[in-house]
């Protein structure tokens, strides 16, 4: 049976310094390897990037210090495996070195029809929904996932 929905994810962060600043050197140095790891991870479908392959150059907010990252995965489990059970977790654990703590939601998940690549406007809308309504079927988190519209299971 063909999968009808995939999982979209967004995460944002306000950088402590411009990408070219020495404060950001280790973060930037690790991006290529993290992207390569994502690209070959089971369940990976797509990630947002410029034609040059740079996802840090995409600006979705009026505030240029906010970076946005988006990707699409086959399931919550496949994304979770990449985020928490691969070498990504070491970079994730160090995020406070490079990004300020934000008071609004910085990551969100939602289901999209298979083949759909979400836009930054969609992602911003989902983060706003999380802020105003909390986790719900249209915008949720790893801590409170929701099944896909056609009932694809959520791993426990």
Image (cartoon, rainbow, N blue to C red):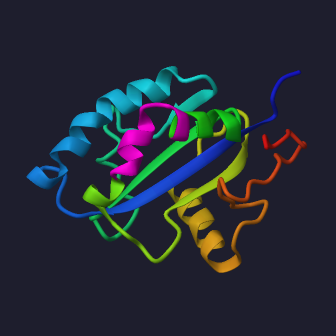
Which segment did they paint magenta? 84-94
Residue 119 shows up from this direction:
no
Percent coordinates x, y for residue 132 in the rendering: 65, 79
In the depicted view, which residue is nearer to us: 53 or 76? 76
Residue 118 shows up from this direction:
yes
Quadrant assignment for the N terminus: top right
Percent coordinates x, y for residue 145 in the rendering: 74, 54
In the depicted view, which residue is nearer to us: 151 or 100? 100
The extreme left residue here reads 22
Q: Relative to residue 45, is residue 57 drawn left or right?
A: left
Query: Is 156 included in the stretch rendered in magenta?
Result: no
Percent coordinates x, y for residue 87 in the rendering: 42, 32
Q: Give the number of marks.
A: 0
Residue shown at 9%/51% (left/top)? Answer: 22
Percent coordinates x, y for residue 86 in the rendering: 49, 31
Residue shown at 90%/43% (left/top)? Answer: 151
Image quadrant assignment for residue 117: top right
Residue shown at 81%/29% (left/top)? Answer: 3
Image quadrant assignment for residue 21: bottom left
- By secondary structure, the bulk of the magenta-drawn segment is best described as helix
Q: Is residue 40 above or below residue 4?
A: above
In the depicted view, which residue is nearer to us: 85 or 50? 85
Residue shown at 41%/72% (left/top)? Answer: 102
Query: Is 90 included in the stretch rendered in magenta?
Result: yes
Quadrant assignment for the C terminus: top right
């Amino acid at each position: 049976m063909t999968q009808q929905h995939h999982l979209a994810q967004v995460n944002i962060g306000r950088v402590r310094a411009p990408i070219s600043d020495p404060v950001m050197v280790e973060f930037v140095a690790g991006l290529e390897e993290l992207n390569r790891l994502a690209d070959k991870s089971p369940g990976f479908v797509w990630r947002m990037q410029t034609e040059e392959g740079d996802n840090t150059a995409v600006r979705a907010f009026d505030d240029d210090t906010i970076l946005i990252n988006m990707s699409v995965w086959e399931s919550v489990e496949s994304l979770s495996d990449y985020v928490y059970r691969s070498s990504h977790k070491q970079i994730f654990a160090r995020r406070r070195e490079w990004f300020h703590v934000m008071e609004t939601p910085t990551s969100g998940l939602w289901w999209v029809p298979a083949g759909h690549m979400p836009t930054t406007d969609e992602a911003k809308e989902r983060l706003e929904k999380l802020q105003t309504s909390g986790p719900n079927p249209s915008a949720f988190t790893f801590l409170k996932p929701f099944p896909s519209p056609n009932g694809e299971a959520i791993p426990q």
